[in-house]
Amino acid sequence: MRAILRFLGFLAVAGGFVALVIDVTRYLANNAWAPATLRGALDAIVTDGGARLAASISGIAGAPAGAAVATALTAPASITGLAGGFIVMFLFRSRDQDGASRF
């Protein structure tokens, strides 16, 4: 299970890096910083993915949770992917044989 979660963290880091390269390329072409948001990334994968996610969270956990998710979806996809991937990879890192952390 740990290997699967570490692999998903690695994919998130790779996706965040790709999104960062795309954002920098867009910045160099347009001379204005406009990073892709999580909502935009979800909308590219699934039609109205960001709106559907916010509505489903709002239906399950209530309006404040839906508003929090809608606010979180405005975060840059590159920074979120990089940070989230590194956090998942750090949390599910391999341990020594005696169970103690290497750090």
Image: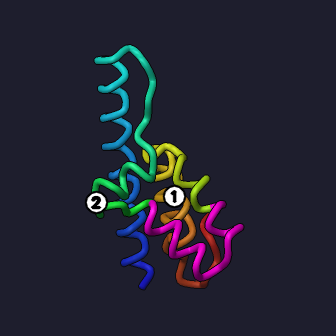
Give the total number of marks visible in the rendering: 2
Q: Quadrant of the N terminus?
A: bottom left
* Relative image position of residue 17 (x, y in whole percent): 36, 44
**Residue kind at label 1, given as amino acid type:** Gly
Foreground residue among 66 and 103: 66
Residue 67 on the magenta segment: yes
Q: Quadrant of the C terminus?
A: bottom right
Element assignment for label 2 = helix
Circle 2 crowding by C-alpha within 10 Å: few under 14, some 14–19, many from 20: few
Against 85, residue 94 (above or below) is below
Q: Look at discs 2 and 1 and give the one toward the viewer.
A: 2
Residue at numbered disc 1 = 84
In percent of the image, x 59 and y 82: which residue is there? Answer: 60
Rounded to the nearest angstrom, the CA distance separating label 2 from label 1 is 19 Å
Circle 1 crowding by C-alpha within 10 Å: few under 14, some 14–19, many from 20: some
Q: Residue 58 vs residue 84: left or right? A: right
Looking at this view, name the residue that lies furthest to the top: 31
In percent of the image, x 53 and y 83: which residue is there? Answer: 97
Foreground residue among 80 and 64: 64
Are the two marked residues, 2 and 1, in contact with CB atoms closer than 8 angstroms?
A: no
Residue at numbered disc 2 = 45
Residue 55 on the magenta segment: yes
In percent of the image, x 51 and y 58: which residue is there? Answer: 84
* Relative image position of residue 46 (x, y in whole percent): 29, 63
Main secondary structure of the magenta stretch: helix
Foreground residue among 85 and 89: 85
**Residue kind at label 2, given as amino acid type:** Ile
- Magenta residues span 51-68
* Relative image position of residue 42 (x, y in whole percent): 37, 58
Among the 4 quarters of the image, the one containing residue 34 = top left
Q: Residue 48 vs residue 63: left or right? A: left
